[in-house]
Amino acid sequence: MEFRLLGTVTVETLAGPLPLGPAKRRSLLAALVLSANTPVPVGRLTDSLWDDTPPSQARGVIQGHVSRLRALLVGADAEAYGVELATLGDAYVLRVPETLVDAQRFEELLMLAREQRTWADTALMLKEALSLWQGPALSGAFTGPPLRAAAHSLEESRLATVEQLARAYGELGEHHRAAALLAAETAAHPLRESLAAELMLALYRAGRQSEALDRFHRTRGLLADELGIDPGHELADAYALILRGEPGAGPGGPGSGLGAARGPAAAQGSAPGPAAAPVAAPEPAGAPAPARTSGAARTAAPAGAVPVPHPGHAGEPLPVDLLPRAPRGFHGRAAELAALTRAAAGEAPVCLVTGPAGVGKTALALQWAHRSGALFPDGRLFADLRGFSEAGEPALVDVLREFLLALGVAPRRIPESAPAAAALFRSLSDRRRLLVVLDNARDSATVRALLPGGTDCVTLVTSRHRLEGLIASDAARPVPLGTLEADDGTALLAGVLGEERVRAEPVAARRLAELCGGLPLALRVTAARLAGRPHWTLAALADELADERGRLACLDVDDTGVAAALRLTVQHLPPEAVHQFARLGHHPGGPVDPYAAAALAGTDPVAAAAALERLAAAHLVAETAPGRWILHDLVRLYARGLDPASAHEALTGVLDHCIATALAAADTAEPGGEPCFVLPDGYRKPAAVRDFADRAEAMRWLAAERENLALAAVAAREAGLEDRAWRIILLQWPQVVWRVRDNWTPLLELALESARAGKDAYAESRVLTLLGWVLTEEGRTAEAAAVLERSPVLAREAGDPLGEATALINLAVVQAELGELPTALENCGRAVELCREEEDRHTEMLGLQHLARMRLTAHRPQEALDCARAALDLGPEHEEAVRRSLLLAVCGEARIALGEEEDGIRLLDRAAQEAEKAGYDDGTVRALEALLRVSARTDYRRRYDAALRRLTDEV
């Protein structure tokens, strides 16, 4: 078990990382690990989890996260490692051995580095310390002020360690290595003067004086432009030292000039001596000996070639360069380029650029490779592995032959077998600083055979697959590549079409970028079509692309296009993954979980999850959250065309899945409630339906799936499946009641259209009842009355007495608000009678609740109190928090009206507390509003204002 803070906050176990969940839970874990073995008060944890004023339920949220973390740790057998998450009064403590925390090991390695007696050992300790970093500290967590400060402190420590390692390399005479290390960090931190100064000296000592001086002028310009300041003493001293050409700073000189590293041994009076020149490893028979300067290898020219002097290194051959030309019209990707620079800064790193077809992986790799040429003085190799090409992959021995020839090996000396050729390649690259770009790799095994042997070599791999095996075996550092933002997509179009043409139609250009989904391949195809047709307008092509039926055809030019690229990816998938992919094309839209995927494909959730993982590995779907996947719009259109005949079957399957799951959620959220309806004709029960542990989980699902359920209802209506459409909408009633002001009217109007299209009086009545209540809560009372007047009549026609009762209750509420109190009381009383005849306590309780409120309004407090008590006694819902809060509020107001003010205040306070505990802000506001009419206590006002603010923020 390992607790990681130096990168994404996670807990690594033998079975993989623990599923920590949301960012706030990671923040909580980070705060506890940073103070390992020390109690952390809830107040400090609150500061770490919220940037501004925390919610009133902050303590409960923290308790929930602690409970989940404790369960995860127990499930991972944390006790066996000496790990325990304990509660100590008003604080929590994570007891954990320091050896299990990467930040603690980092500090220990730094301390060990200071105690070494040789620079070589110091460098080893520092490299080991830096290898613990997997990205920016505390990534994946929501960082409140204390965590931001901790992350900044850790990053400062890392940068200081980089500078120390560079100085150690300088003391060893490995100035090129120091320069490469510092160049990567300076690119990420261009305004850090200490880094720039160290880089200048490393470049100068490596014989690259012009680059060193150029670095000074670039940094000085940046400081002036960005901060309006002049260089500090470190930069100025390094510049002056280089200009004077002092021996201690010159090429090959020791790092004893400005900023030289001092180890602990030096402090004891016995500094490490100069590093001995490295002994060259013997070259394989027949291989030309590479020229070496200052202990660094250089690529020799092939046999018979005339050496061409390299600028700044007279008499040396030019380094080999197999890179294709730099991509034209490259735009954006600043974050990914910086991530590659960071990933390339380690020892023998393997950088892995992954993403879907057409997202621009090769362009990114080549752009970075061309920009970073100075880091690889011994050359750059490139091979297209054609992992997703119809032409098939090249033989490994052929790729290795090309590399070996470029490195100067005579053709007759190249081994015939791939293993022997790979061994020779590793030997020749052992003491070189090479960049090896392996484009379009399909699997990890192919890449492993082509990895260079040198610790200063960088391998850059691109793939449509995640290549997790390469991450596991060779610590490959993934740089995932997503689609372009709209601004970058527009800039890409301008790079091909010209700024004037894009500026002439800025809105159409942005629309084109959005219709292409930010996919660079689609954007380039679009630009190519427009470039060849100067008389076309961007708006006309945007209108053509807006039609989904022909969009993919519009995005193909000759043998290049989105469909062609996707076809090459799909043809490598197993049949079950292709089947799942084709059915996903018929999903109404939004994220897909294994249950929905299984319903689409006619399988079970386990098989669907496995297929989704396979599709995600091929970047055909993207996992937006644990267990939730989504398709890019263009990928969805391609998938839809793979099996168009299955569209109706797949859609019906997923709609019935929505109905089954929403039914389970509603039953869990409101146990004992009357089912809304019978199942539709031809209903297909899913292979498995999600279970909900409690009301909170069911309500979370309804909230999270609201958009998906709306898309499903729209798709059902468009497909003529009206009987599914209104059911999917109506089954969200617990969430409608809970968040009534959350703009439900358009969705309910769609349900009403579907019910009327199916000529279903039952459905129409039920929808009108819920719609009328929503309109009432939105303050649209007159509209609500018009809607609700027909609902009881339709319910009687459909033989639905409970539907009639609910309709009468909602109608009565509106009538009361309109001042028609006698009619309202009569209708509500009739509703209660219907419920008793049908023996439905759930709806009876609802009727009694509103009847109590109306009697209170009619100045009949004793009758209101009796009515509310009867409702509270009904059960089994007497413990349901929302209803209980509303009834307690009526009881409290009735007591006050009867002159029993003390009991009334006590009951209203209980009502407010019940609502606050349940997160029912509407009920909290109502109860506290009544309290403030009879009491001026400041805590009532404070709680009322907070609840009203929360309620306003949610609307």
Image (cartoon, rainbow, N blue to C red):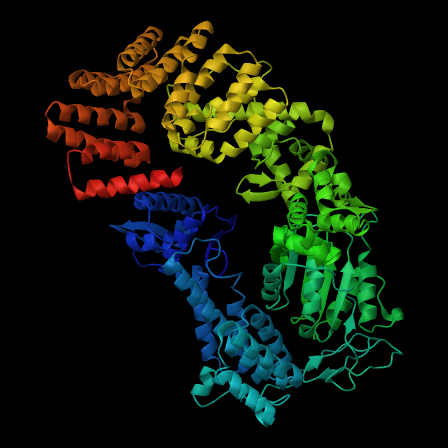
Q: Residue at x 41, y 21 (%)?
A: 783
Of the pair 124 and 363, the residue shown nearer to us:
363
The quadrant holding residue 718 is top right
Q: Position of residue 15 (x, y in %)?
A: 52, 48
Q: Position of residue 17 (x, y in %)?
A: 50, 50
Tell me if I can see residue 471 in this picture: yes
Q: In the image, is residue 797 above or below residue 859?
A: above
Q: In the image, is residue 675 above or below residue 329?
A: above
Of the pair 172 and 654, the residue shown nearer to us:
654
Residue lying farthest front?
504
The quadrant holding residue 898 is top left
The image shows a total of numbered marks equal to: 0
Q: Residue at x 42, y 29 (%)?
A: 735
Image quarter in which the C terminus is found: top left
Of the pair 493 and 184, the residue shown nearer to us:
493
Tell me if I can see residue 360 in this picture: no
Q: Residue at x 59, y 68 (%)?
A: 346
Q: Position of residue 78 (x, y in %)?
A: 41, 50
Of the pair 668 and 516, the residue shown nearer to us:
516
Q: In the image, is residue 530 above or below residue 314?
A: above
Q: Position of residue 737 (x, y in %)?
A: 39, 27
The quadrant holding residue 802 is top left
From the viewer's perspective, tell me whether residue 673 is left or right of residue 129.
left
From the viewer's perspective, tell me whether residue 904 is left or right of residue 281.
left
Q: In the image, is residue 323 above or below residue 903?
A: below
Q: Residue at x 58, y 43 (%)?
A: 623
